[in-house]
Image (cartoon, grey):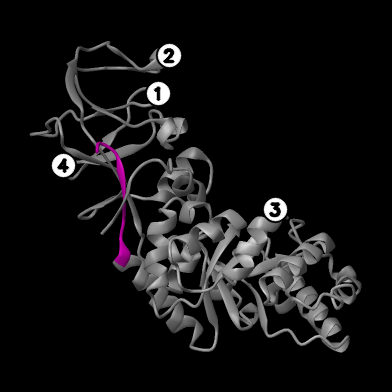
């Protein structure tokens, strides 16, 4: 095993406890493990969360993810957040496993009701309201009429209603507007006779900066993994990064002054340079934009990437670092003592967000739980 991801189970448990202390005991905490648990390892993280007394249920993006969790004996309730095929075979299996569905189209209601009837039990659903992110969801002014057509389906249990903030970490005015729209929609549905127990809108950021929107459940995404939407939130909660990304030195070589490195010869040595070759590249998720910009940690020192990131290889300068040998560990992302390469740092280099840095790590790489 030359390249792998390490998942710190203690950090996950720490982060869950931090949010439980912040949210109190009356708010459901629903960790989000969609998209390979933000790159951390789908089943690995789900099993840790499933054993945590701080977590109440797990959230996934689609039906296939939900069924995979139940296939692997995840005991806590599982909720789908976004989309699913109207395949009766899968829906029946989901109904039997008490998977919770989002509802935002009438044909979904019809097919879920059919699956519930065949399973002999009601299917729990959460009405999704689009309050301003313009993604999936019923528009607020159509919610009452939409729900009026749901009343005929006897095998649906409308357990919850939810929405999603577009920019809760940095746009207070728009966040408040979305919250008000959601509140108004709930009031209109209540006036129409609906009593919906669970209400949720807040993600990790919103739960910290806009607690009025916590209602009685919070979907915990980025915060579960010890990452912050922005630096301002670091003063509000103490989180620990969960993921570190490791590879190995597979060859050493010393180049003469004036040697060209990598495709396109984008780096030319200005002095004799000792290189370490690493078996990792953009296929593995180590972004090509890190070329000549990022650094990795070898023997406790930061070593700059030289030349373009290749599909499967990366070259780094280890000049002046004594004792490096083939087989040494190289940390692409994580900490060795006080020396650190963070997802935030790599995101700045790549012109993106920390979500993408971790989520794009190739799922084929082993995830090792510590």
* Residue 2: in magenta span: yes
Q: Which quadrant holds residue 318?
A: top left
Q: Name the residue under label 4.
A: 299
Question: Looking at the image, do the residues carrying marks 3 and 4 touch, with CB atoms under 8 Å apart?
Answer: no
Q: Looking at the image, how many numbered discs can be counted on the residues?
A: 4
Q: Do the residues labelled 1 and 2 touch (CB within 8 Å)?
A: yes
Q: How far apart are marks 1 and 2 (CA)?
A: 8 Å
Residue matched to label 1? 308
| Chain part drawn in magenta | 1-9
Tag nearer the camera, 2 or 3: 3
The residue to which callout 3 is attached is 85
| Marker disc for residue 242 | none
4 and 1 marks in contact (CB < 8 Å): no
Please identify the quadrant where the C terminus is shown.
bottom left
Q: Which of these two is toward me, 28 or 51?
A: 51
Q: Where is residue 93 in the image (x, y as percent from the top left)?
A: 60, 63
Q: Name the residue under label 2.
A: 264
Q: What element carries label 1?
A: loop
- Which callout, 1 or 3, points to the residue nearer the camera? 3
Q: Is residue 170 left or right of residue 364?
A: right
**Residue in the foreground of this view, choosing between 97 and 149:** 97
Q: Name the quarter where the N terminus is drawn.
A: top left
Q: In this view, does 307 lie above or below 17?
A: above
Helix, strand or loop at label 2? It is: helix
Local secondary structure at mark 4:
loop
Residue under the image location 19 percent in, 24 percent down: 251
């Amino acid at each position: 095993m030359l390249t792998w991801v390490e998942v710190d189970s203690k950090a996950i448990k720490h982060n869950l406890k931090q949010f439980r202390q912040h949210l109190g005991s009356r708010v459901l905490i629903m960790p989000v493990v969609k998209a390979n648990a933000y790159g951390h390892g789908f089943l690995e993280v789900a099993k840790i969360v499933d054993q945590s007394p701080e977590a109440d249920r797990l959230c996934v993006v689609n039906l296939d993810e939900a069924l995979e969790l139940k296939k692997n004996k995840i005991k806590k309730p599982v909720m789908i957040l976004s989309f699913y095929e109207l395949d009766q075979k899968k829906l029946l299996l989901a109904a039997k496993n008490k998977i919770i569905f989002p509802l935002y189209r009438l044909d979904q209601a019809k097919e879920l009701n059919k699956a519930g009837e065949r399973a002999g039990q009601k299917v729990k659903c959460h009405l999704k309201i689009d309050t301003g992110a313009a993604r999936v969801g019923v528009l607020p002014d159509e919610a009452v009429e939409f729900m009026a057509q749901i009343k005929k389906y006897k095998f649906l249990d409308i357990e919850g209603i939810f929405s999603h903030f577009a920019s809760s970490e940095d746009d207070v005015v728009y966040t408040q507007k979305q919250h008000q729209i959601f509140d108004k929609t709930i009031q209109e549905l209540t006036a129409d006779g609906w009593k919906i127990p669970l209400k949720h809108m807040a993600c990790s950021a919103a739960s910290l900066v806009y607690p009025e929107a916590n209602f009685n459940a919070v979907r915990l995404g980025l915060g579960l993994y010890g990452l912050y939407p922005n630096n301002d939130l670091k003063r509000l909660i103490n989180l620990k990064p969960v993921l570190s990304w490791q590879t190995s030195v597979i060859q050493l070589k010393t180049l003469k002054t004036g040697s060209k490195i990598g495709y396109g010869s984008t780096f030319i040595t200005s002095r004799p340079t000792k290189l370490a070759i690493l078996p990792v590249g953009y296929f593995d998720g180590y972004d090509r934009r890190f070329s000549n910009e990022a650094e990795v940690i070898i023997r406790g020192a930061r070593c700059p990437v030289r030349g373009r990131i290749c599909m499967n290889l990366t070259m780094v300068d280890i000049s002046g670092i004594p004792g490096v040998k083939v087989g040494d560990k190289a940390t692409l992302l994580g900490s060795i003592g006080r020396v650190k390469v963070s997802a935030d740092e790599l995101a700045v280099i790549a012109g993106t967000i920390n979500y993408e840095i971790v989520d794009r790590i190739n799922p084929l790489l082993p995830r090792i739980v510590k």
